[in-house]
């Protein structure tokens, strides 16, 4: 998705709050503000689904191995 730059001016207290909240979530201020706008626009569910899909994609091999071990099967067999 193409990105567009948007410049905004806020007071120092708002800027500090945005930085602190973004840092607490482990994301950039840009991402934090983008998520706030999406939530306000009613796209919260889509944001959650996208984040969950990214998480599952990143950790797919870990889940495959963990659940294969729990069932007593070989992870290589599970991927076939």
Image: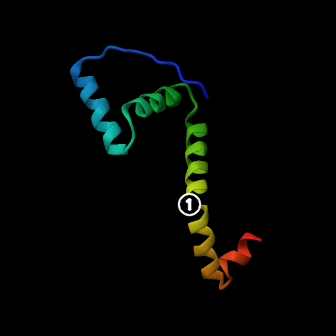
Q: Position of residue 51 (x, y in %)?
A: 55, 45
- Compared with 59, 30 (above or below) is above
State which quarter of the image contains the C terminus.
bottom right
Q: Is residue 34 left or right of residue 74?
A: left
When the figure is inspected, residue 20 is found, relative to residue 33, above or below; the finding is: below
Location of mark 1 (residue): 59
Residue projecting furthest to the bottom: 72
In depth, the one of 11 and 41 nearer the eye is 11
Q: Specify how the rendered protein is coloured.
A: rainbow
Residue in the image at 58% along x and 49% along y: 54
The residue sitting at 48% across, 26% down in the picture is 37
> Is 20 left, or right, of 30 in this rendering?
left
Q: Residue at x 61, y 62 (%)?
A: 60
Q: Residue placed at 32% from the left, 37% from the top?
A: 21
Q: Quadrant of the N terminus?
A: top right
What is the quadrant of residue 28 in the picture?
A: top left
The answer to which image quadrant residue 68 occupies is bottom right
Q: Secondary structure at mark 1?
A: loop
Q: Residue 20's spot in the image, x, y percent?
A: 27, 37
| Residue 25 in the image, given as x and y percentages of width and height | 37, 44
Considering only vertical position in the picture, is 54 above or below 3? Answer: below
């Amino acid at each position: 998705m193409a990105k567009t730059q948007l410049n905004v001016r806020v007071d120092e207290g708002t800027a500090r709050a945005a930085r602190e909240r973004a840092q607490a979530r482990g994301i950039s201020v840009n991402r934090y503000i983008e998520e706030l706008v999406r939530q306000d626009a009613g796209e919260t569910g889509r944001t959650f689904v996208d984040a969950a899909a990214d998480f599952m994609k990143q950790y797919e091999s870990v889940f495959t191995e963990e659940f294969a071990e729990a069932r007593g099967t070989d992870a290589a067999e599970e991927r076939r």
